[in-house]
């Protein structure tokens, strides 16, 4: 949807969102500059920039959601330079964000839920084509913080932990041809199943199998009378909407701006900067232009 196709109310909302985002960015930049000066007036070393890499979407709600999420990251870590770059469809595009950083150090954290082509090829290649001293963090999943957010979204939709009999969940993800992506999604499904105490079946909107509707049908055929759909998407969009519409019972909202998402972005950043985090730690930065692909931490 282009700006010319937005309704008057939607246009006002977009304008308000853009203004609020700009004010938050200004506040964050001021805090960042102040944090670089110690009490004795000396300039502290500037931390590596955090560049959150989103996929991009034609749905205007996605960009608004991602911007709000980044504002939550800035609120949790005042003084940390936080930037946004998209792989496609939305501005700023990742190459433009990195070009603006010049030759400084940056940690690229994919706002993606599993390994796949974007994490393994697209993002590292975009980074290698710039002057930035870039390191690429692991995708967000699998991780217990994602399970925390998934559980919270299900509860918001009407899930009751006390009513497990006859219940099951379909974990609805986008899908990928990369087999490691399916492994990661399956691991998240198992972690969520352990949390809920009911079967959780990973399923996909496209590309991979089983498809969401097929997984729902199989669970109902096995006697599960209450099948929920857990939206395993970072922001609203076509796939998230279609999966929710297929739910025979309840469907949760995308992970979006849940506080656990902001904490997880910082956790992945901390792993790459060798700071204290909830899980594995990564070694110091490789030579300029190099990238690394750590396996996701499963604890913390």
Image: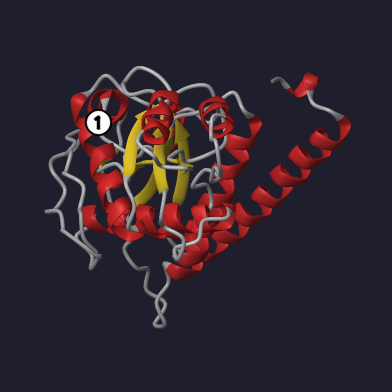
The image quadrant where one finds the N terminus is top right
107 versus 93 height, above or below: below
Q: What x and y, as percent, mark residue 37?
A: 43, 71
Q: Residue at x 31, y 26 (%)?
A: 118
Disc 1 marks which residue?
182
**Which quarter of the picture shows residue 294?**
top left
Q: What x and y, as percent, mark residue 292?
A: 17, 39
176 versus 257 height, above or below: above
Any part of residue 105 in sight: no
266 versus 232 height, above or below: below
Image check: 210 left or right of 248? left
Q: Residue at x 20, y 54 (%)?
A: 298
The image quadrant where one finds the C terminus is bottom left
Q: Residue at x 59, y 23 (%)?
A: 58
Image check: 8 left or right of 21? right
Q: What x and y, as percent, mark residue 112?
A: 37, 37
Image check: 111 left or right of 117? right
Foreground: 299 or 90? 299
Q: Residue at x 42, y 28 (%)?
A: 217
Any part of residue 287 in sight: yes
Foreground: 238 or 273? 238
Q: Give SS at disc 1.
A: helix
Crowding at mark 1 (Cα within 10 Å: few <14, some 14-19, many 20+) = many
**Which quarter of the picture shows residue 248?**
top right
**Which quarter of the picture shows residue 170?**
top left
Foreground: 253 or 126? 253
């Amino acid at each position: 949807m282009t700006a010319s196709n937005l309704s008057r109310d939607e246009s006002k909302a977009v304008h308000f969102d853009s203004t609020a985002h700009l004010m938050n960015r200004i506040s964050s930049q001021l805090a960042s500059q102040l944090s670089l000066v110690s009490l004795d007036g000396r300039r502290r070393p500037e931390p590596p920039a955090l560049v959150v890499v989103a996929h991009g979407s034609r749905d205007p709600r996605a960009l608004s959601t991602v911007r709000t999420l980044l504002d939550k990251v800035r609120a949790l870590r005042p003084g940390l330079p936080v930037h946004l770059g998209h792989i496609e469809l939305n501005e700023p595009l990742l190459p433009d964000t990195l070009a603006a950083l010049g030759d400084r150090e940056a940690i690229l954290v994919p706002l993606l839920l599993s390994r796949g082509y974007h994490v393994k090829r697209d993002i590292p290649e975009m980074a290698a084509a710039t002057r930035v001293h870039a390191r690429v963090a692991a995708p967000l999943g699998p991780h217990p913080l994602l399970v925390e957010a998934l559980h919270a979204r299900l509860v918001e939709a009407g899930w009751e932990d006390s009513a497990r009999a006859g219940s099951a969940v379909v974990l609805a993800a986008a899908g990928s041809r990369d087999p490691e992506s399916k492994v990661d999604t399956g691991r998240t499904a198992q972690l969520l199943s352990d949390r809920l105490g009911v079967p959780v079946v990973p399923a996909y909107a496209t590309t991979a199998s089983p498809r969401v509707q097929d997984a729902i049908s199989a669970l109902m055929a096995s006697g599960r009378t209450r099948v929920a759909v857990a939206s395993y998407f970072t922001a609203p969009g076509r796939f998230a909407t279609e999966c929710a519409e297929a739910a025979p019972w309840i469907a949760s909202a995308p992970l979006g701006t849940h506080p656990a998402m902001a904490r997880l972005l910082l956790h992945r950043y901390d792993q790459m900067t060798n700071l204290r985090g909830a899980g594995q730690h990564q070694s110091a930065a490789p030579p300029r232009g190099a990238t690394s692909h750590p396996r996701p931490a499963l604890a913390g």
